[in-house]
Amino acid sequence: MASFLTDLVKELDDEHTTIAADGKSSAEFSGTIDTGSYILNAVFSGSLWGGVPNNKITVFAGEAATGKTFFVLGVINQFLKTYPDGGVIYFDTESAVTNEMMQSRGIDSRQVVKSEPETIQKFRHTSLQIIDNYLAQDESERRPMIMVLDSLGQLSSTKEIEDTAKGEETRDMTKAQILKATFRVLNLKLSKAQVPLIVCNHIYDVVGSYFPAKEMSGGSGLKYSASTIAFLSKKKEKDGTDVVGNIIKVKMQKSRLSKENKEVSCLLSYEKGLDRYYGLVDMGVDAGIFKKVSNRIELPDGKKMYAKQIYENPKEYFTDGVMEDLEKYCQTEYMYGVHNNDIEDDIFDSEVE
């Protein structure tokens, strides 16, 4: 290590300036939160046992009724299972999430604080106040916390509300700037506090585009600040003629942890919520762990099963060995960077020489 850099940091005596190798930067990736679905974990982080980053902004964007809220409730459920003493700050701009809905997803609503801000400015003020108070606590006394904004698209600006009250219909041209400033300030604060923010947002068709394209509402501010943006679309899942849920296609529009533009599908059922194992059969076939024989799946032991049968009793077929092989596949298929230890060792040895 260059000694003059160490001396420079000591002279600055600034808690926000450190040697990168010390890993003290608030931007350092510190872990993930399980989404409740292995296939989602993989596409978000490159690991079956990963998930959404636990100190960044993550966005679930989609058209109406694509399951954005249920995705978020699934993440909250896993968060509170992992951190039983943790807490949730839920900004509900649609007044859509009830105590009964939370409890039906296994969430103890006593660990959730709900806020219903009408404006972007109110959301910004409240969220920053919460984070500042959280940071003011002694670090040893802080309990894990997660914040949710559901949804961004329903937030108005103060000017919009004032103009509407006056009967004026002029468009607020400052709204995008307010949003950009909001997420710019929040982004660094969240990283310092080690608090994740999950945002639900709407998407719309781009008018005049040469090719069919979707865009996320809210301007560029959230796109720049978010660590991860997932676009959602859906189709119905049926059992015979009965609709039992939705197959949600997830496309990584932006990711700093995994490869962008990757797509996976997961099952959001009406009865059980997000299916943990759905999607792993197709992943196993792609990885060469399973084989597709006509309309059945051939397992490593030669047994042939329908995919539906495997998903009905997943723990029997997704053994520790199979999961380990799938994990290795995930790291090469979804994760950024070099993951071959031999290659890394060769590089290190050559630098030493």
Image (tube, helix red, strand yellow):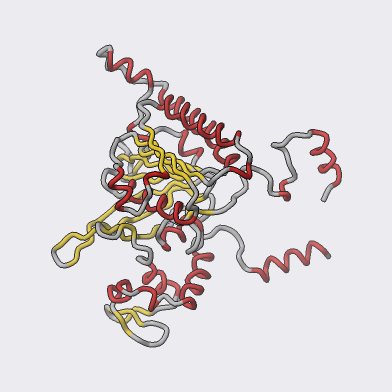
Q: Is residue 341 left or right of residue 129?
A: right
Percent x, y of residue 165: 28, 15
Residue at 51% across, 29% down: 129
Q: How many numbered discs sit on the rendered protein?
A: 0
Above or below for 278 versus 84: below
Give the vertical position of 97 relative to 49 (above or below).
Answer: above
Would residue 261 be found to the left or right of residue 16 on screen?
left
Q: Is residue 127 above or below residue 309?
A: above
Q: Quadrant of residue 91?
A: top left
The x and y percentages for residue 327 are 50, 69
- In the picture provided, is 102 more to the left or to the right than 237? right
State which quadrant residue 36 falls in.
Answer: bottom left
Name the spot of residue 159 as percent of width and height, x first. 37, 18
287 relative to 118, above or below: below
From this viewpoint, which residue is outermost toward the top?
Answer: 166
Q: Which residue is pictured at 53% across the width and 70% down the height?
A: 328
Of residue 213 and residue 2, the one placed in the foreground of this image is 2
For the C terminus, the image quarter is bottom right
Q: Residue at x 38, y 82 (%)?
A: 299
Left or right, 152 with respect to 225, comes to left
The extreme bottom residue here reads 302
Q: Nearer the viewer, residue 345 or 280?
A: 280
Residue 321, image x and y in percent?
49, 78
Q: Residue at x 41, y 69 (%)?
A: 283
